[in-house]
Image (cartoon, rainbow, N blue to C red):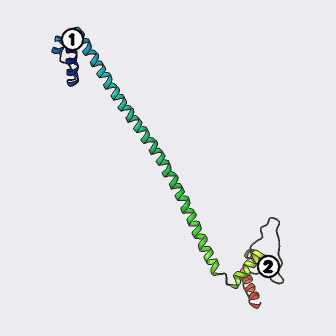
Amino acid sequence: MSRLRRNHISRTQYSDPVIQTDEMQNLSEEDRELAARIEQRRNANRRTVVRKKRRRVVLLVLIFAVLLTTCTREIVRLKAENRALKKQHAQLEEERDRLTKELGRVGDRDYIKEQARKQLRLLDPGEKMFVFEDGEAPSDDEAAAKDAEKDGKSSEETEETEEEKSSDE
């Protein structure tokens, strides 16, 4: 008879989570102890389930935080790379424009003469070249302005005389 009551208590407890107090009074001491142990196991199982759910939630939050941090870091890196590439693109466009202008001047006689002076260090007859130790020579305009100051002429007059000399040749 004790076995039937245990089964009956087990079934009623799973179907009804709270054992009614009047039912507890009808049970024997052994059945009450069994009912109390079953209730304790249930509570322990509930706590375990709640703990597992909390662990899952915490784990999901941690995974989300790691993914968010990683994605944010990647976004910041890509934005910085984008800014650098835009800057490089602007520099390349400026260089392209400069080279296009230079290409347009390639057939010009004055441009050829200028490049021959700069790259090949060619001189017109009667000109002298000064080489400085630090490697930086003054530009042609600076040199002409200094010469003009020495001679007492303005830089415009010097340019005019240089143009006249080149047209004579």
- Where is the C terminus found, in terms of image quarters? bottom right
Residue 132, horizontal then vertical, whole percent: 82, 68
Let me know if residue 137 appears in the view.
yes
Residue 135, horizontal then vertical, whole percent: 79, 66
Is disc 1 surrounded by few (<14), some (14 to 19) or many (20+) residues within 10 Å?
A: few
Residue drawn at 27 percent across, 19 percent down:
39
Mark 2, secondary structure of its residue: loop
Q: How many marks?
A: 2
Which residue, given by chain and number where applicable, does mark 2 sit on?
Answer: 122
Residue drawn at 24 percent across, 9 percent down:
30
Answer above or below: position of 163 versus 119: below
Give 152 or 95, whichever is nearer the viewer: 95
Answer above or below: position of 128 versus 17: below
Give 24 or 101, whichever is nearer the viewer: 24
Going by the numbered disc 2, the residue's amino acid type is Leu
Residue 82, horizontal then vertical, whole percent: 52, 58
Q: CA distance from mark 2 to mark 1?
A: 122 Å
Residue 145, horizontal then vertical, whole percent: 75, 76
- Considering every residue shown, the one lying at the far top of the view is 29
Q: Residue 155 appears in which quarter of the rendering?
A: bottom right
Which residue, given by chain and number where applicable, does mark 1 sit on?
Answer: 2
Residue drawn at 30 percent across, 22 percent down:
43
Q: Nearer the viewer, mark 2 or mark 1?
A: 1
Is disc 2 surrounded by few (<14), some (14 to 19) or many (20+) residues within 10 Å?
A: some
Give 136 or 116, whichever is nearer the viewer: 116
Give the label on residue 119, or none.
none
Going by the numbered disc 1, the residue's amino acid type is Ser
Q: Residue 81 appears in which quarter of the rendering?
A: bottom right
